[in-house]
Image (cartoon, rainbow, N blue to C red):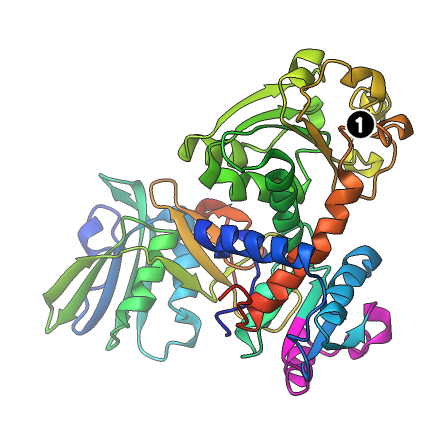
């Protein structure tokens, strides 16, 4: 790859979904949320790309795939400024910002070892109690966790 | 999910709290009723708590219901690896109401999600114990005539003490003033202080259990200071007696002031306080019976005052 042409650093996409403006440190968490490992179409992942907003960003491009809005919104947990572009025939046909849902089910592990969710085969559930500081509260044990410290299951 | 389940004190409104207290007061005057005739109640104690279990089981018996259950997880199938979900689903087939205590936090909330049988949380780890909070409210109202405008001093382990945390949450409707008296290691957590600020509840913090604090209180709520809560054992040795209440400290206390304690106590209330007219902790424990009768009726959709 030619480091002088950052716009081409990640291959162009004919059809699919681009998730841009992911903080570099959260890129692989975002990949897990999208379950990129199970993807069967072409996936391009770039990281540590220059970004005016973030300083350094990551980007994920998945060919021939669209994601449910709920799935994409879960990315807001670790990448609140992430942008989603849906591409058809090389053109952006839909552009939007991810939005943190009010409740997050089955994604984050509760940090409290005495929480029922860590001791039963069940899904976790968190309410978003602070959107600015992205803080989640376990619906079962009540313990708070900052998104930055959240362990993604 | 049964809407009559009670997991947390924050599940019930101000009006409902007051109604439950009215029902409890009715049961204090008339404890025996055949309201639960033909009903079976399970008391599932995955963690032993003789005091709470006896109180709930007495409440069921006084209402003429029958009780099944266990008092220790070691005797149950959960010790063989059965999930909580499976235990709850199995027991739900047999009973009209489940009263459960569990060592894991959030266990009761989860139990409500896997069954349509009503659940009463009788304590889930360090998390919630709403019948304790209700009996605290009952005791305050009974001794002071009202829940409104009380000056309540919380003493001891304010960091881990779930009873004091739940009491703060429940008192938000009644314009209290709180004093938090604790050593540096066991201060009220920031989240509850923020709760007070958000709800316009006045509070002040003290490391000194001074006569000023004692003499201006309507309620002094004592809690156990446990050695195992300290990271610094020297600190424990320094503070363990500072927050001990004895009779000589009560000379200038307000006449209406009452001392509460969730029990069991260790040494935070000296024996000589027991005979002082301000002592109320044994009566407080008895009030638990009436409150639990009221909570059982609520869970089963029975309203004796209607
Ligand atoms: Zn939890």
Residue under label 1: B232
Instruction: Tell me where residue B62 sits by quadrant.
Output: bottom right
Judging depth in this view, the residue of B66 and A142 nearest the camera is: B66
Q: Residue furthest bottom?
A: B93
Residue B110 seen anywhere in this rendered image of the structure: no
B21 in magenta: no
In front: A147, or B97? B97
Question: Does the magenta run of residues contain B94?
Answer: yes
| Residue A21, horizontal then vertical, whole percent | 27, 50
Q: Is residue B231 left or right of residue B130?
A: right
Picture layout, residue B296 above or below residue B271: below
Q: Residue at x 44, y 72 (%)?
A: A37
* Helix, strand or loop for disc 1: loop
Residue at mark 1: chain: B
Image location (x, y in percent) of residue B83: 69, 76
Q: Residues within 10 Å of mark 1 (few under 14, many from 20)?
A: few
Range of the magenta residues?
B71-98
Corner quadrant of residue B239:
top right
The quadrant of the rendered image in which ligand 1 is seen is bottom right
Q: Is residue B215 left or right of residue B3?
A: right
């Amino acid at each position: 790859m030619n480091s002088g042409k950052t716009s081409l650093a990640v291959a162009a996409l004919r059809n699919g979904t681009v998730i841009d403006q992911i903080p570099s440190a959260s890129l692989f968490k975002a990949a897990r949320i999208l379950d990129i490992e199970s993807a069967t179409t072409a996936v391009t992942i770039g990281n540590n790309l220059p970004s005016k907003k973030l300083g350094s960003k990551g980007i994920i491009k998945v060919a021939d795939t669209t994601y449910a809005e709920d799935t994409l919104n879960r990315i807001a947990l670790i990448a609140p400024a992430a942008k989603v572009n849906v591409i058809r025939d090389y053109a952006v046909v839909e552009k939007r910002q991810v939005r943190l849902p009010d409740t997050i089910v089955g994604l984050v592990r509760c940090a409290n070892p005495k929480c029922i969710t860590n001791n039963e085969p069940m899904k976790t559930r968190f309410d978003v109690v602070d959107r600015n500081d992205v803080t989640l509260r376990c619906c079962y044990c009540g313990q708070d966790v900052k998104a930055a410290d959240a362990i993604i299951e | 999910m049964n809407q009559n389940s009670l997991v947390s004190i924050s599940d019930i409104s101000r009006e409902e709290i007051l109604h439950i207290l009215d029902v409890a007061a009715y049961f204090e005057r008339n404890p025996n009723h055949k309201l639960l005739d033909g009903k079976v109640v399970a008391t599932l104690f995955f963690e032993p708590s003789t005091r709470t279990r006896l109180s709930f089981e007495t409440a069921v018996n006084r209402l003429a219901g029958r009780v099944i259950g266990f008092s220790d997880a070691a005797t149950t199938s959960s010790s063989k690896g059965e999930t909580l979900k499976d235990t709850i689903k199995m027991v739900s087939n047999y009973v009209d109401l489940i009263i459960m205590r569990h060592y894991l936090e959030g266990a009761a909330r989860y139990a409500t999600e896997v069954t349509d049988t009503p659940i009463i949380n009788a304590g889930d780890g360090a998390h919630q114990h709403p019948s304790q909070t209700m009996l605290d409210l009952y005791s305050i109202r009974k001794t002071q005539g009202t829940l409104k405008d009380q000056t309540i001093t919380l003493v001891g382990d304010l960091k881990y003490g779930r009873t004091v945390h739940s009491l703060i949450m429940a008192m938000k409707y009644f314009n209290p003033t709180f004093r938090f008296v604790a050593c540096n290691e066991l201060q009220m957590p920031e989240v509850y202080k923020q709760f007070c600020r958000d709800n316009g509840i006045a509070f002040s913090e003290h490391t000194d259990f001074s006569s000023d604090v004692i003499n201006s209180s309507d309620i002094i709520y004592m809690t156990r200071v446990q050695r195992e809560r300290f990271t610094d054992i020297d600190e424990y040795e320094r503070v363990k007696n500072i927050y001990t209440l004895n009779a000589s400290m009560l000379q200038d206390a307000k006449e209406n002031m009452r001392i509460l304690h969730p029990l069991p106590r260790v040494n935070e209330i000296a024996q000589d306080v027991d005979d002082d007219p301000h002592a109320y902790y044994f009566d407080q424990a008895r009030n638990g019976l009436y409150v639990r009768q009221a909570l059982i009726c609520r869970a089963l959709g029975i309203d004796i005052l209607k």
